[in-house]
């Protein structure tokens, strides 16, 4: 059985409500509606599967220096969220789109910055020669899937955003802080995926 098959077999309906927005509640729909986006949750095919994450460059206009999944806005030329996630991963980390085996599209996540994000769960071969896009990505790293899916690894953090204190989940892996929408989408996956 392939890793993709194992992941598909272990996806279940969530036993509790999924996260969207932040811990303050549902993100309010922005004027003009949600902006469609997609991210790739790429799980590496190895004995101890890992998940690829990126560290964004520090001089980006939005989310500078943050840990994120490869992904971004869905362009009109994209054939849906899967195509957008694969295109963005090719642009950001040079992931060949034929290298990914799509497992499922997961539950939409609404960010406080106005995006409706579709996470695309996929498997990829381990140790691909990935290259960070110099203007967008400082580093590509991998975190063991079992570590990311362990709710005990997360704590609640807070920050001020547009005049109010916003609460979110965060975890630390080595020297990297995974928080906000990325952490919430991981925790949503943890509520859907039973993994040893």
Image: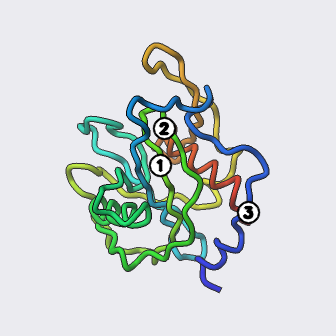
Q: Which image quadrant for residue 62?
A: top left
Residue where numbered disc 2 is placed = 111
Residue where numbered disc 1 is placed = 117
Q: CA distance from mark 3 to mark 2?
A: 24 Å
Q: Give residue 109's position: percent from left, percent from top.
A: 54, 45
Q: CA distance from mark 1 to mark 3?
A: 20 Å
Residue occupying the point 43% across, 60% down: 81
Residue occupying the point 51% across, 56% down: 119
Q: Give residue 177's position: percent from left, percent from top.
A: 48, 40
Quick one: label 1 or label 2, which is nearer the N terminus? 2
User: In which quadrant of the rendered image does the N terminus lie?
Assistant: bottom right
Q: Which image quadrant for residue 10?
A: bottom right
Circles 1 and 3, Cβ within 8 Å, touching? The answer is no
Please identify the residue farthest to the top as the structure is shown.
163
Q: Of 159 and 20, which appears nearest the observer?
A: 20
Please identify the residue farthest to the right as the structure is shown.
15
- Judge from the rendering whether residue 71 lies leftward or rightward of residue 160; answer left or right: left
Q: Callout 2: few (<14), some (14-19), or many (20+) C-alpha neighbours within 10 Å? A: many
Q: Is residue 27 above or below residue 68?
A: above
Residue where numbered disc 3 is placed = 12
Quick one: label 1 or label 3, which is nearer the N terminus? 3
Which numbered circle lies on residue 135? none
Provide the secondary structure element on which disc 3 rests.
loop
Q: Callout 1: few (<14), some (14-19), or many (20+) C-alpha neighbours within 10 Å? A: many
Please identify the residue farthest to the left as the structure is shown.
135
Provide the secondary structure element on which disc 2 rests.
loop
Quick one: label 3 or label 2, which is nearer the N terminus? 3
Circles 1 and 2, Cβ within 8 Å, touching? The answer is yes
Q: Is residue 37 above or below residue 59?
A: below
Residue occupying the point 53% across, 76% down: 45
Q: Is residue 140 above or below residue 33?
A: below
């Amino acid at each position: 059985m392939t890793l993709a098959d194992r992941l598909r077999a272990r996806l279940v309906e969530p036993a509790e409500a999924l996260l969207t927005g932040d811990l303050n509640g549902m993100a309010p729909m922005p004027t003009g509606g949600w902006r469609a986006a997609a991210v790739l949750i790429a799980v590496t095919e190895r004995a101890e599967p890992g998940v690829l994450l990126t560290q964004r460059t520090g001089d980006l206009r939005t989310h500078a220096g943050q840990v994120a999944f490869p992904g971004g806005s869905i362009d009109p030329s994209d054939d849906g969220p899967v195509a957008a996630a694969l295109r963005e991963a090719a642009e950001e980390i040079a992931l060949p789109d034929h290298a990914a085996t799509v497992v499922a599209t997961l539950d939409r996540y609404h960010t406080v910055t106005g995006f409706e994000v579709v996470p695309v769960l996929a498997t990829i071969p381990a140790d691909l020669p990935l290259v960070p896009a110099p203007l967008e990505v400082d580093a590509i790293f991998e975190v063991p899937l079992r570590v990311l899916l362990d709710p005990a690894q997360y704590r609640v953090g807070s920050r001020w955003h547009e005049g109010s204190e916003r609460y979110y989940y965060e975890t630390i892996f080595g020297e990297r802080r995974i928080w906000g929408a990325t952490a919430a989408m991981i925790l949503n996956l943890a509520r859907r995926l039973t993994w040893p």
